[in-house]
Amino acid sequence: MSFSETLKPSLRPTPPDTAAVLARLHALIGPDLEETNRIIVEQLNARVELIPTLGTHLISSGGKRLRPILTLVTARMFGYSGRSHALLAAVIEFIHTATLLHDDVVDKSDRRRGQATANAIWGSKAPVLVGDFLFSRSFQMLVEYGDLKVLRILADACAVISEGEVMQLVVSNDLATTEAQYLEVVSCKTATLFAAAARIGAVVNGRPEEEELSLARYGELLGRAFQVVDDALDYASSNETLGKSIGDDFQEGKITLPVIHAYQHGSEEERQFWSRSLEEKARIEGGLQRAIELIRARGSLDYTMGLARQLAEEAKAQLQHLPASEEREALALLADFSVSRSF
Amino acid sequence: MSFSETLKPSLRPTPPDTAAVLARLHALIGPDLEETNRIIVEQLNARVELIPTLGTHLISSGGKRLRPILTLVTARMFGYSGRSHALLAAVIEFIHTATLLHDDVVDKSDRRRGQATANAIWGSKAPVLVGDFLFSRSFQMLVEYGDLKVLRILADACAVISEGEVMQLVVSNDLATTEAQYLEVVSCKTATLFAAAARIGAVVNGRPEEEELSLARYGELLGRAFQVVDDALDYASSNETLGKSIGDDFQEGKITLPVIHAYQHGSEEERQFWSRSLEEKARIEGGLQRAIELIRARGSLDYTMGLARQLAEEAKAQLQHLPASEEREALALLADFSVSRSF
């Protein structure tokens, strides 16, 4: 199946319908997610009104809440009956939101989730500082929870995420970037938080380390699949569906897998186009359209989506080490969804 | 004594000579500070070379290390014989450095400590992300240390610092800012970390809460005095002495105490000048020179330095609740130094 077909539901053999996936997740953890949302609003409280205003703008903008959902589902998977998982899910959404605020400043992005970014509305200063507040508030919440193991998992995750962001900055505009380097950036900047989010469900239940690590690996692979698809969508989706500006990665000179593949398999003339556009940052008339055409012509989207599907399958394989349950099925569905989604 | 005299050592009645103060501190905690510096270098290690490069650029640029020194001196004050104080001092310097990196991006500052800022050299992206790394690494180090009380003190401090930074952003360019609002910003963005740094010395020694809080109050008052002097120096010092660009606050429209005082005591014409310069951000020929003249003419530097001296005296008074020691004397000297310094 080619990637273009994944965007046409009628042609997909077993399409995990987005609405159906979300409905199933909500049936399992609906009240937990509401509690997480309540905690998010409560913890955004600060002595300066701009902090909750700006924080709410992004957090309430209809993100998929995938990371907190991972924590809630994995906690429920083992019959967790406490309330701390909702708190930890909120912490994870805070950390994610902080990185998005800083990302959008660093990338000078105008749109995210179908609306103006915080930096487009408030300038770049406030999002840098409010991002810092969200990081700090996350650690305050974790200290309040008081489990050093969870603290370690998330402090480590935050350090790796920022390393991944710096790594991405270093390889940006460099077409010599290899697929391995690309995947390391993806692993650090995105998959690490997915892994931590999934792992914490086992930790709060005091499950054996083997299960904990299976969930961490599931999260890691799911996160990689998710990011790889994201990078494909930036050359494939339409603005309306994606909610952010298509072609952002191209404009910013990010070297993602579709580009790496198209560059490596391109003719001399095509490689010159890529080099002028991404390394020399020349503004070429119709450049994005040409980039999309070359990526399609070289089969680079199919290649990228093939890798994503493989990662999602590997993620599902990790679930076999865990007891069968409705939650486990939902996690498998989430892996399929990460690949088939169009936003 | 007028403030201009504080800049001329020959006229000061009891000038705590900078070199003498630093020599005394080094005699007390020299090896500890070396250990802190060693830990800083070790912990800057990351999988991307740009992180230690950029971090070292700022951390090794000859900062005064006042915050880590506070932790080291207060820890030694109670006869601490472990090695964790050096680690915690490094954590505090990391947190401070992270806020400086983000501050300089937010303020678009070109110079700090007599050299180009990280954003002037590497652009604004890297310092935002390396700042995030330093925050994260701080929490990793704290988790490794494993004391939840210290974790709480520093997580709380980080949240308050970022609230203070946002608060400062909100009141910038607004001449209706009151002295009380100004002092709240100072307390949050600067004094909070001084307070935490001083307090931790008592915590690692397991001292009674009363002593812990006396040190916290000492640090808070010292930090306020320090920042108030900083804000005075921005209109009084020369570029060479200060190490950063004089008049930065004026260019950025920061409403600091010298300005609040000069505005409140200015003639109608003078208030119009302040309003045009700071609220309407008009670039007036010779504006900075005029600002400096008005601040001197209205006695606003004397007023500002008077407040700083008062804060330093209050800081010293807190030390009376603590057992007499060489370290206690050094802390008193540090309070004097915070006011008499010219950089």
Image (tube, coloured by chain):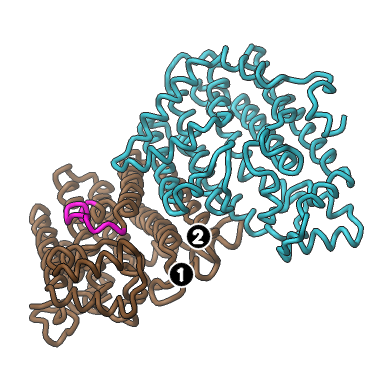
Chain colours: A cyan, B brown
The answer to if B183 sits in the magenta stretch is: yes
The x and y percentages for residue A291 are 80, 51
Task: Give the magenta range.
Answer: B173-184
Q: State the residue at coordinates (17%, 46%).
A: B213
The answer to if A147 sits in the magenta stretch is: no
| Chain letter of disc 1 in the image | B
The x and y percentages for residue A10 are 82, 21
Viewer-proximal residue among B268 and A79: B268
Residue A72 drawn above or below residue B151: above
Q: Report which residue position mark 1 lands on.
A: B117
Q: Report which residue position mark 2 lands on.
A: B127
Residue, far bottom:
B10
- Residue A12's image quarter? top right
Viewer-proximal residue among B239 and B46: B239
Residue B30 visible in image = no
The x and y percentages for residue B250 are 31, 69
- Residue B266's image quarter? bottom left
Are marks 2 and 1 in one subunit? yes
Residue A251 visible in image = yes
